[in-house]
Amino acid sequence: MKGEMPVESKKIWNCPAGSFRGSEEEGVIQIKGIRYAESKRFERPVPYRYPSGVHAMTEDAPAAVQLKSGVESYLNDAIYEKLPQEESCQYLSITLPGDAREGEYLPVMVWFHGGAFRNGTCDAPVYDRVPMVREGRVILVGVNYRLSLLGFMKEKSGEPANLGLFDLIESLKWIQENIACFGGDTDNVTIFGQSAGAEASRCIMLTPGTEHLWKRAILHSDPIGTMTDRKKMERKMLEELNTMPDDAPLDEVRRMQDAITKHVDERSLPRFMVFGPHIGVDPVPPESRHGSRLKEVMKDHQLMVGCTSREGAPYVGNNRTIQILRKTAAGRKGVETAVRLLSRAIFNDPGESFARQAAEAGGKVWYFDFYWKQGEHFLAGGHMMDLVPLFGGRRLGGVNMMLGMHPDETMEAGRPMRKIWTEFARTGEITSPGVDGMLRIRRLEQNEG
C-alpha cells in the first residue's frame, strides 16, 4: 500500500462542528485541516462552527506564524518558514482506520508537536500518523496552536499570557464534542507530545478543570529544566514586545520575534527555550500547587514519561567547533561530557523527577529511556530520535535523523514501540520492559526513594 495516492472518501462525518469529507489512503482515512477555534491577536480562542454543507478536508493544516528552525532543519530538512501560515492557526487533522466499524469506539491519541514553542506543524512529514493508526487501530489527532510571540508572550492588556495553551485546551474540548462522530471514545483520550509538545501536555495535566478532557498522557523529552527562573528573561522580552503596535503586520511580528530572540542575554537554562508557558499564569497554577494538583489528577489518570539517552546531541552536532573537537579522542570525550551534562540538566533529571512526583501522588507511572543505535552515530539517542521509530520515518528519506537507515528499516524496527504506545492508550497499562536495543521501560512505584 506504500505510495498509494489518496482518493476522496465517500463517507461524510456529520458533527456538531460541521459536516466533513476526507480522503482514503493506505488503509486509513485522513480528515485534515479542520478549524477547531479562531482568535484575534493577543486574545483567547473561541470555538469555531462550520457553515452548512459538506466540507472537503484534504489539505494539510496551515501552520502557525513562525520562522526557520535551526535544529529541525538540520535534523529533518524542515522548511516551516515556507509553509502556508495563518495567524489564527487553530486547526487539527484526524487519521482513523479505514475499516472502522459502525458503533466501534476507538482510543483517541492527541499529538502536540514540538519545536521550542516557536516552530512546527501537526502535518509535518516527521509526524506521519498512518503507521500508528493502521497498526494500532487508534484514532490519532494532530493539533496546531499559536507559537512564540502570538502564543506565549502576552494578551491585549500587555500582561503575560498562555494563549497557545488555551488553544490546545480548546482543541481537547472540540474532541470531546466531536470525536465520537468519527468513532472515537471520548472517555479514552491520550494526550502526548515531544519537547515543547510534552511541556504543553504537562501544563494541561497541571491545569485544574482539564481532567475530563484526557485520560492518559505521554511526555517525550520534556524540557522541564528550562521552565524555572524565567521571570527576569520573560519580563525583558515582554517590555520589548510591548514596543510593537498590537496591529502590526505579520512581517513586523516576525522581525520582532527574531529581534527578541537575538536580544536574550539570559545565561541560565531558560535561554535554551526562550518562548514557553508562563508557570503561575492562567491557566497554569504556580509551582507551589503542582504537588497537590498531581494528587488530584493522578488517582485516575495514567502517565508515561521518558527521554532519549543523549538529548543534547543535535544541539551541538551541527556546530563547526564541535565537529573539529570530535576529530581527537580527548575532544570526543569532552564533547560527550557536554552532551551528557546538557541532557541531564534540561531533560533527563527533571523529567524523571516529575515522573517520580506523579508516582508519589498515587498514579500509575512509567519511565522510558530511548537509546537506539547509541555508539553507532553521533546523533543516536539524541533529541527527536525517538520520533523516527514511533512515526515510522517513511516520509523522511535521507535526512540526518534517519542515521543512514532506509525507511523500510525504521518502519519495521518501530513496530514494537508503536504497539506499546497504542496499547497504553487503549488500556493504561504497560506490560513490556521495552524493545531490545532501543528502549527501556520501568514502572515507578510510590515510596521508591
Image (tube, helix red, strand yellow):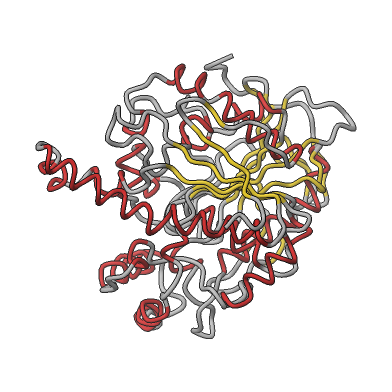
Q: Is residue 250 left or right of residue 173?
A: left
Q: Is residue 115 left or right of residue 42?
A: left
Quarter of the image holding residue 209?
Answer: bottom right
Quarter of the image for the C terminus: give it.
bottom right
Residue 290 at x, y = what percent?
62, 71
Where is 332 relative to 231, above or below?
Answer: above
Q: Is residue 413 above or below residue 358?
A: above
Residue closest to the eye, 153 or 244:
153
Left or right side of 195 for 103:
right
Q: Is residue 13 above or below residue 269?
A: above
Observer-nearest residue: 326 or 410? 326
x then y, percent, for residue 231: 42, 80
Image x and y of residue 370, in percent: 46, 37
Q: Quadrant of the N terminus?
A: top right
Q: What residue sits 36% from the left and 52% below the top?
A: 343
Q: How many marks?
A: 0
Q: Residue furthest top?
A: 1
Q: Residue at x 67, y 34 (%)?
A: 422
